[in-house]
Image (spheres, rainbow, N blue to C red):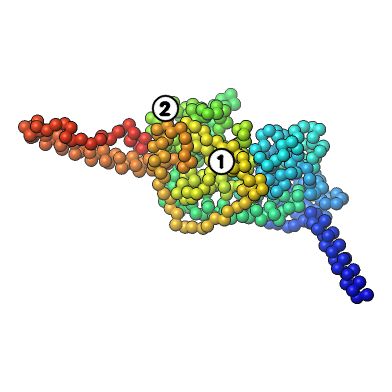
Amino acid sequence: MKRFSALALATAVALVGNLGIARGDCSFDEISLQTAPGFTITIDKEYKVLEDTIAKVKYGLYCDSQPKGVDGVDKWFKVPVSSVGVRVPIASGFLEALGQRDALTAADSPGNLTNICLDASKIKSLDTDEQANVDVVFSSDAASDGDKSVRLPTDDSLSPLQKAEWIKFVAAFFNDEKSSDSLFSSIADAYNCHWSNLQNVAQQPHAYWVQYSDNGKPSYNIIDSSYQKSLLAGAGATNDTSKALDDSSDLSKFQNAIKDADFVIDQTDLTEYGKRATEWYGKFGYSDPQNSGVSFLLSRNIWRTDKYTSKSGVSNFPEFGYVRPDLVLQDIISVLEPTYDSGHTRRWMLWLGGTNEDTVAIDADNYDCKSPWISSVTKCTARSDFTGGDTDTSESSEKADDSDKDNGGSGSSGRTGKIVGGVIGAFVVVVLGIVGLHYFNRHRRNARIQALRQSDFGGEGINLHDARRFS
C-alpha cells in the first residue's frame, strides 16, 4: 500500500510538472527596461499590457481568454503567437535573434528579406487576404493592418541601444521576455564596453553622417539624429553638428560645413551600382575631389552601411544591423581606429572610395543558420590604455593609385595625412635648402664645378604630385 501511494504521488507530481511545462509558454515574466526605449510592459495575473509610449498605443496580451473590463487597451492578442507578418525589416531581425524565424510566414516584400535562413517557400506576400492568416503584423504604422498591426520604430530618433531594446517588445508576443532580456543585456554590455574603451583617444577624428535627397529640390544634410550621433561618439569621433544647415539646399555651405571631416558616412539612396562613388561625387558637387584639398576626399574615406547584402543587392543593415548595435559600433571603430581590434571582420561598413564596390552577399560562408552570430555576443574586455593610433599609410597609397580592390583595412585618415604631409613638407624645405647652398657654392667655385658631371649628384627626386595627397 505504501509502495502504491508513493507511486501515485510520483505520478501526480509528474503530471503536475507536465502541466507546468505545457503552460510554461503562458507564464508572464517581469523584466526591466534599461534605456527608456519608448515602450513599457505591465504585468497582471491574467494579461500583460505593452504600451508604445511614442505612438500612444496599448496592446493587451493574454493566454487563455481575453480579459473583461480592462480599460485603455487598444488591441488584444492571444499569445504566444505562432504566425507573424512583417512590413519592416527590423522585425525579421528580431525574430531571427529570438530563434523565431519559423514564425515569419508573410511579408510586405518577401524578396527584400536578406535572412538566408528563412524558408522562402513559406513566406507569402502580405496582401489583404494573407493578413487573415497571421496572428500579428509588425509594421511602421500601428494602423496599417487594423487590429493585427503593431508598430515598431523605424526612424533614427532613438539611440542604437534604445532601438535594439525593442527586441523585448517583440519577445513579449512569444512570452519569451527572459531570453530577450538576457540577449539584450549582453549586447548592451558589449556596446557600452567598446564605447568606454574609445573615450581616451588622444586625437579624435572628425566624422559626419550625410545624406543627399532630391524631392524636386536638391537637399544636402548632415544627419544629426540620436542614432548616428551616438555611434560616432561611441567610436571616439567628434564633429560640429551645429553646422547642420538651416537651408539644406545650399551646396556651398554644406561643403564648407564638412570640409574638416576625416571620415564621412553616407546614407544617400545611390542607384548606379558599380559607379556609386562617381555618383556620390556628382550629387555632392565634387567635380575634382583629388584636387579639392579636403582631407576625407584625398584619403577617399567615404563609407556606407550596406556591405552585407542579399544576392539581389538588398542591404542587410536594416534587418540585422539595428538588432546588433554592438557590432555596428565595432564596424565603425574598425574604420576610424583600425588598430583597436585588427581582428574584427566588418559586416556592414562599405568603403565607397574605391573603384570597386566590394559588397558581400550573405551566405553560408558568413552566416551559420545553426549557430547565428546575430544571437551570439562576444564579451568585450574593458581597457583604458587605448589612445588611438596611426592607420596604415600603405593603403592610403593604394587608394591614391586607384586600386581596384579594397583590401579590407581602413583607409589612412586625414589625421595621418596631415602628419605625413607635415613631415614631407619639412623634408622638402630641407632638401631645397641644401640644393640652394650647393648651387651657391657652385657659383663661387665655378672652375671646380665645371669638372663635375651632373650625374654625379644621383639620387631620386621627390614626386610632389604624390606628396600632394598628404596635404
For label 1, count other residues whose C-alpha is less than 10 Å away and answer few (under 14), some (14-19) or many (20+). Answer: many
Residue lying at 62% horizontally and 51% vertically, measured from the top left: 376
Q: Let me know if residue 316 appears in the view.
A: yes
Determine whether, in the image, residue 343 is placed left or right of residue 160. Answer: left
Q: Which residue is mark 2?
A: 288
**Position in image of residue 298 (x %, y %):** 41, 34
Quadrant in which the C terminus is drawn: top left
Residue lying at 28% horizontally and 35% vertically, measured from the top left: 462
Quadrant in which the N terminus is drawn: bottom right
Q: Quadrant of residue 271?
A: top right
Q: Nearer the viewer, mark 2 or mark 1?
A: 1
Residue situated in front as seen by the camera: 241 or 382: 382
Residue at the left extreme, as displayed: 447
Q: Which residue is mark 1?
A: 348
Check whether the beta carbons of the residues at disc 2 and disc 1 lie within 8 A of each other: no
Residue type of the residue flagged with mark 1? Trp
Q: Let me know if residue 54 appears in the view.
A: no
**Position in image of residue 213 (x %, y %):** 56, 29
